[in-house]
Amino acid sequence: MTDVKRQDCGSVDHRVHRRQFLEGMVAGGLSVASFSGLFSIPAFAEQARKEQKHCILLWLCGAPSQFETWDPKPGTPTGGPFRSIPTKLPGVQVSELMPRTATILDKLSVIRSMKTAQNEHFQAIDLLTRGDAPRPPFIRPTLGSVLGQQLAQLDSPIPSFVLLDPCPEGNEFKAFKAGNWAGWLGAEYGPVRVGGEYRIENIARAEDLSEADHEQREALRRFLSRKYENDRKSAAAASLNAAYERVKGLMSCAHLFDLEKIPQKDRERYGPGTFAQHTVLARHLVENGAPFVMVANGMPWDCHVLNHEIHQMLVPELDQVIYQLITDLEERGLLDKTLVLIMGEFGRTPTLNDARGRDHYPNAWSMAMAGCGIRKGVVYGATDTNGVDVKENPVDQRRLFATVFSALGLDPYQQYDLPGLPSFFRVEGNAEPVREVLA
Amino acid sequence: MMKPEVKRLHRHMLPTAVLGVDVRADGRTLYAACMDGMYEVSAESGEPKKLYAHESYASGVVLFEETNTLVSAGYDGVLNWFDLSAGKQVRSVKAHEFWSWQLARSPSGKYVASVTGQYLSGGEKYEPAPEREPSVKVFDVASGALVHALSHVPSVQSVVFSPDNRYVAAGNLMGEVRVWDLSSGKLAAQWTTDAFTSWGIIKSHCYIGGIFSLAFTPDGEHLLLAGMGPMRDPMAGNGRQLWQRFAWKENPPRKVDETHAGESGEGLMETLAVHPGGGCFVMSGRLRGGAWNTALFGLSNGALLHSLKTDTRVTRALFSPDGKRLVLGGTRRQPNFDKNGAIPAFGHVDIYEITV
């Protein structure tokens, strides 16, 4: 058992003993019933309802340029063509492509000293969504799966992990998406992905099927498949059951995924693009209880070609999205309970390639966060004059994940003992959270 | 047409990428618009002299020998008039709120045109939003006065005047070309080709590419367009090296010809110019895959006549007025910082002797 270093911010998670937690999982058979097991502790469930926390991850897949967003270097050989502008924080500037975010930078924390080790998309996406490098055969759950499990309400039909991403064709992100998101948590903590279409298709109950008939069929299906699963110890059946459970839940909350039901004015404020529309939908889902929503849009930020020409379009959309999301959450009294993460899998090179592009760069990049557990108006870390390297306070994926868990009141150093596997921790190596950005 | 003979005379390096070039009629002096400002370069020695800078990249330059004046444009949206005799800036005009993508001078020397436009999301699939300011502006060179503010769909990336000074044409991200009558400012032609624009179904779910260069044929009847063919993954930059030729006065404008099969590789073509003698034209840009990044084509039949591999990305190609020189401005990959903390020079101007 590790020496637990708690970020005690009043979360109920701190009051649930690890052994209780594990017993809850093991009693239900590790993957499928762990959720129920956890919430069978009455004090936990009640407290969780009161303190429902959420997380929205704006996943800037492909990796945006820090120079054209959070860490501009105008007038330097690496700075690119865009100027920087002042923000609400005295002395702090961001790219001129982010005028709206500049006005609310006092509500965000920006880390300008991200320094990681993977410079290929697939591995870096894996690293920055799971918080650590692979350790076969153990598959670490992604952030969405962990937070979905930890933050979900027992009686909510909303999926614990929603991924809004329209990506229609193959790329590294699609390859990642085909992988195991939930790891040892099991299939029910994988994401429900909605993409391309804003409504979830094929989950409406057939018109000629009554509610009672539907319930009876569902009960029979559940009985038979559980029996099969128990008899055969079938992981496939367990996964299938998880899927059925999820669809059943979705049927009762499908209306929440309907953008048409969100006021047109709200939608227009965010902007017309898919990413913007998915973000307003994420806000809507969180308002209605979704614990974790990840918003992506394929991987448009991978600007090996025409970096500035693409950032001139993508960053203004992101700027508008950040401003509207943070403002909306604050006005709705949700910002203090919702952690917003804005990041990609690495940054982009200081120098330009011969195609006007910036290439992959994990050595020195930026991300931002706001909301639940996050101090407002902090810029942490710095890069050197030309943005080539981190000058002070490097932050890797472990420190980032320690910060995220701490902000949400979850123990970053929670230890897990899985049958037949070495112990592991939510965050390995006792990595320190970035305390300067924690509220 | 006989195959032209092409021989490189000089490669002159400049500190940063060259985005625009012009040359004196005698071929002895070049003017380069670079990421870090405006340079005068001796064609013989290559000695660069920095003249001034824009607040962002300098993106285009045109020379008016009659008055010994440069007009330059930049990503700061500003046009600067620079008196070369006096060695000082004599006028500055805020032409656009966004970049000047390209600058052109009329053959008469009376006008300059600059095009702008920030591509902003206007729809679910990132269709360009309508312009926020006129995308095409024509200025009187002598007075600096705005003559026309013309409407297009951003981003508008290329502009050219017709040889008879009657028309100005501009092409955009979406492959739309608009031609206006300069005397009235009225639209004379408008059409769209889908050959130059990608919607990245794999990575980049937005529009990329467009028409990067335009040139009228000497008789003014046809327009040549340059860019890169569509890609599934725009980040591969592997679209076909492409020009198209349109009989723009026909209604609707008709495509006459395009890069012939088997005569192109892959890569963005950013510049196109017709030889003063009218026998050929040059198209140049980046080589992503294939055998060349600069090629001469017969104007009458579109056939590939000669090709070059410069090992750089060429942003601007032009012929000297006497047709004896071909000038290519461009850039290599920006090098990393050296041990002294400086970035070695990576812009270039190449000068070729050409016989056609």
Image (cartoon, rainbow, N blue to C red):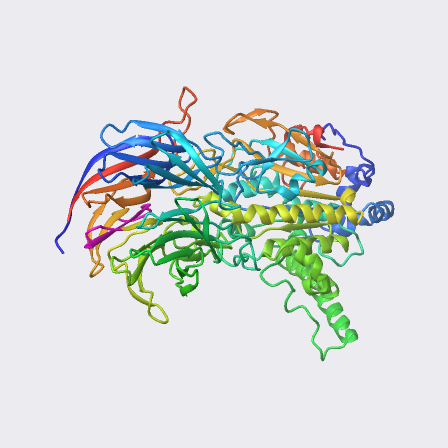
Which residues are the magenta region? Answer: B274-290
Work out whether residue A32 or residue A307 is closer to the camera in this orientation and state it.
Answer: A307
Residue drawn at x 47%, y 46% is: A309
Residue drawn at x 37%, y 27% is: B344
Q: Is residue A136 magenta?
A: no
Residue drawn at x 71%, y 33% is: A377
Q: Seen in the image, is A429 located left or right of residue A64?
A: right
When asked about the image quadrant of residue A251, the answer is bottom right
* Relative image position of residue A42 (x, y in whole percent): 87, 48
Work out whether residue A319 or residue A82 is closer to the camera in this orientation and state it.
Answer: A82
From this viewpoint, is residue B2 visible?
yes
* Relative image position of residue B42 (x, y in whole percent): 27, 30
Q: Seen in the image, is A365 located left or right of residue B147?
A: right
When asked about the image quadrant of residue A95, the answer is top right
* Relative image position of residue A240 (x, y in whole percent): 64, 60
Residue drawn at x 73%, y 27% is: A3
Q: Seen in the image, is A198 located left or right of residue B335?
A: right
Q: Which residue extends farthest left?
A: B2
Q: Where does the N terminus of chain B fall, quadrant-wise? A: bottom left
* Relative image position of residue A16 (x, y in whole percent): 81, 39
Q: Is residue B276 magenta?
A: yes
Query: On screen, A110 above or below B233?
Result: above
From this viewpoint, is residue A416 visible?
no
